[in-house]
Amino acid sequence: MNAIRIEALTKRYNVGFWRPRPYLALDGLTLQVAAGEVFGFLGPNGSGKTTTLKLLMQLIFPTSGSAEILGRPAGDAAVKRRIGYLPEHPYFYDYLTAEELLAYFAGLFGYAAAERRRRASALLDEVGIGAERRFPLRKFSKGMLQRVGIAQALINDPDVVFFDEPMSGLDPLGRREIRNLILRLRDRGCTVFFSSHVLSDAEALCSRVAILAGGRLIAGGPLSELLAFQVRGWELLMSGLDAAVLERFRSGPAITGATPLGGGRFALELPLGIPPERTLAELVAEGAQLVSLTPIRDTLEDVFVERVAAAARSRRLEHPQP
Amino acid sequence: MRAVRHIAVNVFRESVRDKVLYSLVLFAVLLIATSYLLGQLTAGQDIKIIKDLGLASISVFGLLIAVFIGIGLVWKEVERRSIYSLLAKPISRAEFVLGKYAGLVLTLLVNIGVMTIAFYAVLVYLGWREIPEVREAWPAPAADPAMLGAIGLIAIELMLVTAIALFFSTFSSPFLSAVLTLGLWVVGHFNADLRDFEAVVESRPAVWLARTLYYVLPNFSAFDIKAQVVHAQPVGVGYLAQTAIYGLVYIALVLVGAAVVFSRRDFK
Ligand SMILES: Nc1ncnc2c1ncn2[C@@H]1O[C@H](COP(=O)(O)OP(=O)(O)OP(=O)(O)O)[C@@H](O)[C@H]1O
Ligand SMILES: [Mg+2]
């Protein structure tokens, strides 16, 4: 079953006061996210990620198109009981403490007072807010607010969560904690839909991603597919390699590069065309020892930069500037 | 309904933690408390002046409180985007508007209650201090319960002002909302003049326009029975009930309008 179904979703703003011109913040986005998936929603600044999430939360209304969450139209009361949402740069009532805020939100789901307190304190533990939970939120730093924002999104044990840049403002430790939290959510069967600029996080967490640019979907699919055909070669670390042997291999096609690493070890670059097992076997036969063998593949960042640049080029062709 | 109550309680909590509101109420109570000094100055021991002043204080400070809390609350929530996470919870935008309003009314009524208690405390003290001969000469006792009727209508009037302020704040800035609300309040006090417009003007369309405005604009002067109660003229229960119902129906219509406007807007 699809947890999220987005059909030709479009949002047009009219910008300019005297002569309003239409501006497409989101242009016919079609997307499905399966239940239980961790889905990364990527794209450069201003590409329409936040717009999409706000449309899904019905904070803004689409110009055309539709969106369904858990098989029901977005904004449906029954849907809202089962989802969580972390807005971009979250901000909350500054006169409440973190504890009070979470208890307040829990109350909106109809939990009894004791249960509200229990959930609030468990979630604040989970996102690493300690004694500060008794402070009014106006005294919270950016990263602490972000953590509270994540906690409030999980107050109802949601089946689907929407995070708009969950890692924004977090320290390295916090980012690792949130990464682990997302993995725990996934293990619990929760669908996670998150936008991010931190591609290494998306790479580590997501099963599938979508890349947006200029309000349009420009790439999408399983991460393995997006990155698999981008394997560029292999990196082989060997020790005990004789200099003369290396020289001989270097002159052939099997090794395209070699970097001495100290301690008598070498990092060798193997091309894609020749099976790395064969080169390895030959080197081992020459008395060298294997340290490691890893594929050199494009990172999500490489794919991202390449696709976004290509999309920008094709847009320039569609709309040439005078 | 649970959501409405929850939001209302939170609004009340917000206003309890707001220092500006405290200073307003404190100032009003002080003013009422010191009004008996005025009674000493005018040696005629005219308790009417003190009653006048007290009711006017409740009405003016109540208006300030109603406008002050009514214009900012929804706007602030949208402007600071705290509404984003709130509306993702299982509540509708109409429930949000109703909850905010209920919380504002709760705040308003508590404030009016505090001012009323201060007012009656001063009156009881003055009545007790006065010599019996003077007391006999008063047209009504110092702590006249009939004044509660006047305060009740003031409360309903201010609830209507709050609803109007809330309505404007669902789509405009606090400054504009304050100007519009106060403007409507002033116009609404002269509303009764519009009904008898044909006595002044000949032109048919102008009279029609005046008539329409008379029915559409809130008739705030109807809520003002301060002069009657101070001068111990009887005000019928029928009039009180009728005016209260008028106010409540008007409030309901304004709230429906606010909910409709708020349900359609984009949060940018
Ligand atoms: N209220 C608005 N009026 C006009 N244009 C808007 C409005 N809100 C957003 N936009 C435009 O829509 C586009 C998409 O914005 P959006 O906030 O969705 O980007 P984003 O992908 O979330 O970017 P970022 O990575 O910086 O958060 C932007 O070009 C922005 O200028
Ligand atoms: Mg964004």
Image (cartoon, coloured by chain):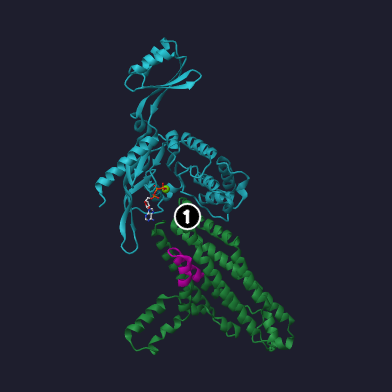
Chain colours: A cyan, B green
Q: Tell whether position B132 is magenta.
A: no
Can residue B205 be seen at all in this image of the molecule? Answer: yes
Can residue B116 be seen at all in this image of the molecule? Answer: no
x and y, in percent, of residue A283 in the image? 41, 13
Quarter that holds the C terminus of chain B? bottom left
Query: Element under label 1?
Result: loop
Give the main secondary structure of the magenta stretch.
helix
Q: Is residue A250 above or below residue B37?
A: above
Give amino acid for label 1: Arg
Question: Viewer-proximal residue, B123 or B80?
Answer: B80
Q: Is residue B47 above or below residue B1?
A: below
Question: Looking at mark 1, is its residue's CB closer than 8 Å to ligand 1?
Answer: no
Q: Tell whether position B168 is magenta.
A: yes
Answer left or right for B187 relative to A221: right
x and y, in percent, of residue B180 in the image? 45, 72
The image quarter in which residue A286 lies = top left
Name the residue beneath numbered marker 1: B81
Q: Which residues are magenta?
A: B159-180
x and y, in percent, of residue A231 in the image? 36, 27
Q: Is residue B260 above or below residue A167?
A: below
Q: Is residue B21 above or below residue B80?
A: below
The residue lying at 34 percent from left, 30 percent from top is A230
Mark 1, other Cα within 10 Å: few <14 / some 14–19 / many ≥20 = many
x and y, in percent, of residue A293 in the image? 43, 21
Chain letter for mark 1, please. Answer: B
